[in-house]
Image (cartoon, grey):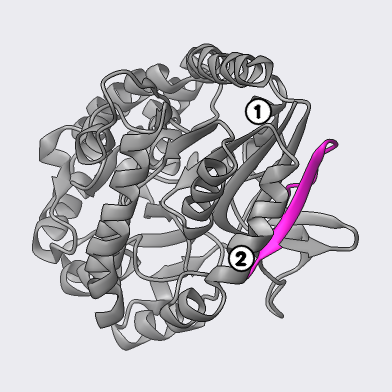
Amino acid sequence: MKIIFAHDHRFVPLEGQVFSESQFDSSLWIRYLRHFEQLVVIARQGSLSKQKKKENLVLSSLENVDFKFLPNLSNLTNQILKRGSCLKLINEYVKEVDGVIARLPSEIGLLAIKSAILNKKPWAVEVAGCPWDGLWNYGSLQGKLYAPILTRRMKQAVAKSQFILYVTDRFLQQRYPCATNAITINCSDVEISSPSPDVLNRRLKRFYSFGDRKIIFGLIGTLKGKFKGIQTVLVTLKKIRHQLPPFEFRILGGGEADSWRQLAQSLEVDDVTFFDGTLPGGEPVFQWLDKIDIYLQPSFKEGLPRALIEAMSRGCPCLASKVAGIPELLEPENLIIPGDVSHLGKLLIKASYNPDWCMEQAQKNWQRSHDYSKDVLDIRRKNFWQQFANYISNCTLD
């Protein structure tokens, strides 16, 4: 059985293999290959910037996974000039497969759904985020105008789908409801082993030396765009710098850091702000998180942020914004309205002088992360994709 996975993610072809700056490492495809013999990934093609090396990327290539690249359709010009040719290409790919998985929001995913309907192929949807939050909060005027259009198109697609995987427990289900007879699942993208008590014990011991060293604030997120709220943290640190003990702010994520360094410099926090590039998923990221004292996720848009759950699994106290599925993870008193510099500042000051609060949050977050361990999610995910595979087989027989 052959299936398409369609999404707007940028992959980088390099030396006969395909890489990604973040997410979509080769191990992710296994969740689909357990049920389908071949996977065709339709996505956008990225390139390796001069500031990056191959070692900064994660390998996406895997046996029985083929990649097909389309132009970027996330701007008005390409929507007008290239949408038709892209749909024609996707139609050719869809005719050769047994079904389609569309990861939304994405223009390529929506085109793949349209093609699946035209070609009478079974299709499923992964609802990974909400386009409204990103386009409205930090898009151009064009983005603001397009936000309601893309949101409506996505709602229509989800409402028509027979199989829907939501990455949140409640938020995306409420914003993108499905048909009453649809088969649905709530299942995060996160891939963590069952959190170890040793991790929590090391975390708690770290707080014993809280007043004797620099406090390290950390954030994981792409440097492309302002969606992760890096600017919120930088402005906050500028305002409260002299109210904090010695500290560092470290950012892990792909993208060009020059403009962010310039912003940090203009705010006079460049000497305490560090851009750590990217790391392969798994243990290298966990080791990075183990050196963080307080994890920050002041995002303007999200689905259910994998990085936040990973930080929780390492016992990090966390402060974040109340968007998308984040309130499903953290207590209300640890959340801010996106962009609320004043509130974030108050929370950072409180956290920086209160090791007891940090230890309490470490234990709560570590315990909550158990709900997202690989063993728990794998069972849920396997059952869902097996149902979809069975549905495709029945459609083929009919």
Task: Tell me the element at label 1.
Answer: helix
Examine the rendered structure and indicate whether residue 115 appears above or below residue 371: below
Pick the front one: 305 or 204: 305
Farthest front residue in view: 398
Element assignment for label 2: helix
Q: Nearer the viewer, residue 85 or 306?
A: 85
Q: Give the percent coordinates (x, y) of residue 43.
A: 63, 57
**Disc marking residue 32:** 1
Residue 235's quadrant in the figure?
Answer: bottom left
Q: Residues within 10 Å of mark 2 (few under 14, many from 20)?
A: many
Give how far across and how far down residue 159 sits, in percent.
31, 36
The mark closer to the camera, 2 or 1, is 2
Q: Which residue is mark 2?
A: 86
x and y, in percent, of residue 234 in the image: 29, 70
Q: Read off the magenta span.
A: 58-72
348 relative to 340, above or below: above
Magenta stretch holds residue 338:
no
Local crowd size for mark 1, using a 10 Å CA cut-off: few (<14), some (14–19), many (≥20): some
Q: Residue at x 73, y 47 (%)?
A: 60
What type is the residue that disc 1 sits on?
A: Tyr
**In which quadrant of the rendered view does residue 228 lie?**
bottom left
Q: Amino acid at mark 2?
A: Cys
The residue located at (38%, 40%) in the rendering is 308
Give the mark, 2 or 1, whose residue is nearer the N terminus. Answer: 1
Tell me: 375 left or right of 361.
right
Query: Who is closer to the viewer here, 212 or 123?
Result: 123
| Alpha carbon separation for disc pair 2 and 1 | 24 Å
Residue 291 visible here = no
